[in-house]
Amino acid sequence: MINLVRAEFLKVRTTQVWFWLLLAALALSALLVIAPLASGDISTERDAAQMFANASTAYIIVFVLGVLGVTTEFRYQTITASVLTTPSRWALVTAKMIAFALLGVAYAAACVILQLAIGLPWLATKHLGVSPASPDMPRALLAVFAILALFGIVGLGVGALLRNQIVAVVLGVLFLAALQNIVLAIPVVRYAWPYLPGGSTASISAIDRSTDNFGGVHLLPVWGGVGVLLLWAFVPAVIGAVYSMNRDIT
Amino acid sequence: MTSAPGLAAGGRISVDRLTKVFSRRIRAVDDLTFSVEPGSVTGFLGPNGAGKTTTLRCILGLVHPTSGRATIGGVEYRAIPDPLRAVGAALESSGFHPARTGRNHLRVVCRAAGLPDRRADEVLSVVGLTDAARRKVRGYSLGMRQRLALATALLGDPRVLVLDEPANGLDPDGIRWLRGFFRYLADQGRTVLISSHQLGEVQETADRVVILHRGRLVRAGSISELTAGTDTVTVRSPQAAAFASALTAQRVQVQQVDPGTLVLRGVPTDRVGHLAFVHGIELHELSRRRADLEDLFFALTEQAATAPVQAGAPR
């Protein structure tokens, strides 16, 4: 299994997609620190912690990385070589899940380090002495790691289900970035929002859990958010493995 | 490439009553049985859509047979513990990521199979791709991709090689090299199964052939067995019609292809010459033509196509 996970890392490392997506994730993370600090929205330590927790928005990029991790194999038919080397498709899927969860963690580390490097000195100039050990900060940073690790797997699952690269990326991003948030605007239906990927992510990363921030919808407790996100990660991956990966490869 | 470790039960490929029905009831492979012996190069022939690739995919565990089974050394591919060290495969559709270099493609496979990166460099040099190893596959010609696919198949130093149209896209030099290479591998006791539609190529390369048509086995055996008794004699004469009736009277099988030309079967040239002399026939040509695989192939597949109901009836 270690060999398989290492092979998955090498697959990612030997093409350039990871680099461009990492740049995108870093740019997004930087923006999420620079914009609120420049506009003066950050006045308390709690605001600062929330700002750092918002690096988890990079989940969309890690999701795309995961989708590409599966769909590229179908697009270029490298899946044939992968399955010939590893006839057990469960082993292949498991290795991919481990590898992409770890890639999510690596992206999280890069995003968090960049945010802290920009944000902490800047906060100091505003006389807010925030450090990674300040109240709410460990939770905020941990949330980023957990969310990005899980979204690597969510991407894999969606990729395995849809198999078509363009369809999976476009539908996935459209849903995550736009459609799921429309739900918040619809009466009654909005109470389902915490069970969507965006809502469960917010349940994990929200420092101020007041319902005012979420259109009157109650967030799940943190562990509930983690549980729902785990379902989003593993249910598509398992269905994808059973349905899609077990089909004839022609 | 000196040792051929691998399967305890030997490198015999055995296909036993294999049937694959795709959706919409397309019978890609229909009750197919044949075997491929170690130490030989076996050509797997058939027109496009005959079911060759589906059969190879069943052998490699990529496609689930509807019924029947395919084994290598007595074991199904999926049950081989370290498959790359036992079986090397290059399929037409096995792809490469265009942005990955040839060497990195091989390293990924090495990593997954627990082989050292050194193997990637070794097989690159075997197939003559060392100079292009660090270039992206995007810039490879078809022939170079074929060589890379072959290199992938060789990574685990397998006892059994299954190759789909390996000569496609190779230049004449490459084809000649490939021919020698297959011979070399077979002489080491390995099992080499190559599918092809380039029949002349297979005749040069293979010891045995398995001919497939519409998913069914048409014929299997050595090339000399299969072409035996199918030589023809061509006669050109201004008195062709008269000679034809004289030959028919001698129970020679005659086919008049044009007013001045006859094609005879199952008769040696000296007898034809003698009969011409006896009957006072003027000859402009008397030549023997060895049947080749191509003739045999068309004869067999046409029979199979036009007279499926009379299969087994004397012809």
Image (cartoon, rainbow, N blue to C red):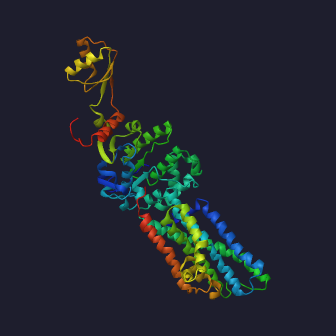
Q: Is residue A208 visible?
A: no
Residue B192 appears at what percent x and percent y? 38, 47
Give the image location of residue B196, x and y in percent: 40, 43
Give the camera-side residue of B313 and A155.
B313
Quarter assignment of residue B223 = top left
Outermost residue toward the top? Answer: B280
| Residue occupying image coordinates x 67% and y 88% | A135
Say whether residue B250 is left or right of residue B104. left
Residue at 44% in and 70% down: A239
Q: Is residue A249 above or below residue B299?
A: below
Q: Position of residue A246 (x, y in %)?
A: 41, 64
Residue B28 % position (x, y): 35, 51
**Position of B83 relative to B224 (above/below):** below
Q: Is residue A109 above or below residue B176?
A: below
Vertically, is B271 above or below B216?
above
Tell me if A78 is positioned left or right of B47 in this view. Answer: right
Residue ranking furthest to the right = A125
Give the left or right position of residue B234, taking residue A168 as reference.
left
> A186 or B270: nearer the eye?
A186
Q: Is residue A125 left or right of residue B171?
A: right
Residue found 65% across the figure and 69% down from its top: A25
Residue B225 seen by the camera = yes
| Observer-nearest of A223 and A81 | A223
Q: Quadrant of the C terminus of chain A?
A: bottom left
